Amino acid sequence: MLKLRKMTSVYDMKVFTDNGDYFGDVEEAIVTMTKVFGWRIRATRNSSLSQALGGAKGVIVPHRLVKAVGDIMVISKTAIPEYGDAAEEPSSTEMAEGDF
C-alpha cells in the first residue's frame, strides 16, 4: 500500500545507504511542477559523505536513487560520490575529445 508523507516530515531525516552506512541528513527537497526531482543531503560529522567529500557541505541525490522512506531514508550505494585517482586523471578518450 502506498503511504503519503508531508514533505516537511522528511527534513532532517537520517539517510543511510543500502549497505547500512550513515550518509547524512536530508536538508531539503528539490521539486519540479509535479514530482520530487531529488534531495539535498547535508554531510554531517561521522558520515560516509563527509569522509568522501572532504570540505564540501553536501550533495544532491536524484529521487530515483531513493529506495525507501520511513523513519529513515535509504538510498542506493551508487549515490556515494567516487573521488580518487580515476576521477582526477581523465582517460585518453576524454583527452582526445577535449582537444578538438
Image: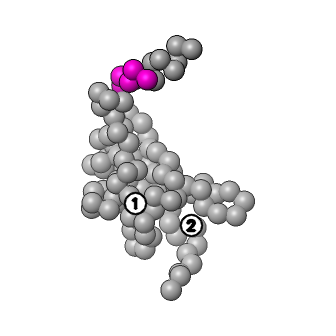
| Of labels 1 and 2, the one closer to you | 1
Q: Position of residue 42 (x, y in %)?
A: 44, 49
Residue sitting at 45 percent across and 58 percent down? Answer: 65
Q: Is residue 45 left or right of residue 97?
A: left
> 10 Å neighbourhood of mark 2: few (<14), some, or many (≥20)?
few
Q: Position of residue 39 (x, y in %)?
A: 52, 55
Which residue is label 2 attached to?
Answer: 8
Q: Is residue 41 above or below residue 92?
A: below
Residue sitting at 34 percent across and 39 percent down? Answer: 82
Q: Amino acid at mark 2?
A: Thr
Identify the mark nearer the N-term, 1 or 2. Answer: 2
Q: Is residue 94 left or right of residue 49?
A: right
Q: Position of residue 37 (x, y in %)?
A: 59, 56
Q: Position of residue 50 (x, y in %)?
A: 34, 43
Mark 2, secondary structure of its residue: helix
> 10 Å neighbourhood of mark 1: few (<14), some, or many (≥20)?
many
C-alpha gap between disc 1 and disc 2: 19 Å
Which residue is label 1 attached to?
Answer: 75
Residue segment shown in magenta? 88-93
Q: Is residue 24 above or below residue 4?
A: above
Q: Is residue 77 above or below residue 93?
A: below
